Amino acid sequence: MEHSIEAVAGNGLTFNPHIAALPPYNAGMNVALARALSGRDDIARLASNENPDGCSPAVMEALASSSFEPWRYADPACSALRAALGVRLAVAPERIVVGNGSEEMIAAVSRAMLVPGATVVTVVPSFGLHEIEPLAAGATVVKIPMTAGLGFDLVALEQAIRAGPRIVFLSSPWNPVGPALDRPSLERLVAAVRPGTLLVLDEAYFEFADAGGPDGIEVLRGCQTAHVVLRTFSKAYGLAGLRVGYAVCSDLELARVIAAAKTPFNVNAAAQLAAIAALGDDGWMKDSVARIRAERGRVAAALGELGVRPASSQTNFLFFDWGDDSTALSAALLGEGIVVKAWREPGYERYVRATIGTPAENDRLIMALGKLIAR
Ligand SMILES: Cc1ncc(COP(=O)(O)O)c(C=O)c1O
């Protein structure tokens, strides 16, 4: 671990031991580093689940308009964005808290709910922050492995949820694996939540899910279970660089405490304007999602022909077992200018997650994997 307790003692500082001992977040490699390491300019960045189509032109117009005043503090309450979201989702804006990315809401929920020694349940493999933020608060994280068929282990999850953790973090559609809970499965897990437990349903990839699948906000509407549904503008809306996501909370008191756990001016002016503009151009988002879903089917079929079988995906990425340590694969792909994410959680080091990029980027990935397999 980089920040050992000895290093802390050496310079006389005493760190919060929960923070000092945190595992690093496995972020996708940035383009500058990928260029430096690969010696290539044409980097296909397929590690961070960004939108290869960019974002709506309405976003760029909003940022070029006179409404954008970088010299002013932005509205700390994000009132206009929360009002727009309230109308879109048919939710009282007072139940919505906007974050500097939905990752900030994962941190705020953890900060609001957890004390050292509290228990959190999530899955493995998992989105790193569902573990890191609870660990930062000194919580113990119980991780339920996926099934051999690369799905949710509902029986084990139900049991772990019934045991009464403070928080359950579930992403559906599931990062990094790809499947989404169907409505009966989601309802079954919701029914297992007891008073005293907060269910956090992270729907970062909601827009990519199959039509007819459950909408967490709808399923949980009016239900007694304390819950937070997380959504983001980073993926389908293509605003990853601006950082804006939000939490829809089951009640006003929960929303108040989560808002108290964020920094006051957490969402900058550009992000607020951009998110409102993006929300107003759903047509762009839907077209982009349709293209990405079609590409996802094409790439999954091509990988299948190579003998690589990705997990079923309702997201903008594919997750597959490479059969060997995936670090070697990601290094070989980097040599071709392709950045993917080698999974590092114990037990899953043979797995790789590859974002669906442009058709040309996807072709490069398929070709490069084909070459490696033929060797
Ligand atoms: C499941 C999940 N939740 C939350 C996030 C955080 O997204 P952001 O902070 O960009 O909204 C991500 C990003 O990859 C994610 O995959």
Image (cartoon, grey):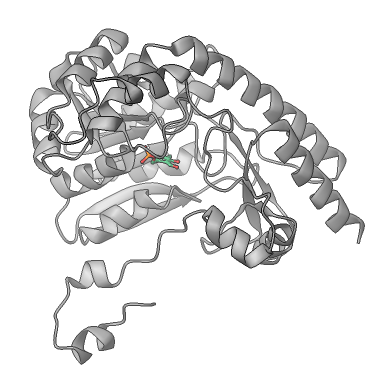
Give the x, y percent position of residue 142.
36, 55
Q: Is residue 321 left or right of residue 97?
A: right
Residue, far right: 374
In the image, 3 versus 133, the foreground residue is: 3
Residue, far bottom: 10
Residue 246 visible = no
Res 202 quadrant in image: top left
Res 61 quadrant in image: top left
> Where is the C terminus found, in terms of image quarters?
bottom right
Residue plotted at (24% across, 67% down): 19
In the image, 275 versus 104, the foreground residue is: 275
Q: Is residue 2 left or right of residue 185?
A: left
> Where is the N terminus found, in terms of image quarters?
bottom left
Give the x, y percent position of residue 208.
53, 24
Residue 248 visible = yes
Q: In the figure, 283 relative to 261: above or below?
A: above
Residue plotted at (20% across, 21% down): 224
Residue plotted at (68% across, 59% down): 334
Res 12 quadrant in image: bottom left
Give the x, y percent position of residue 156.
45, 44
Q: Is residue 79 left or right of residue 337?
A: left
In the image, 120 versus 128, the foreground residue is: 128
Q: In the figure, 326 relative to 147: above or below?
A: below
Q: In the figure, 177 relative to 68: above or below?
A: below
In the image, 310 versus 160, the foreground residue is: 310
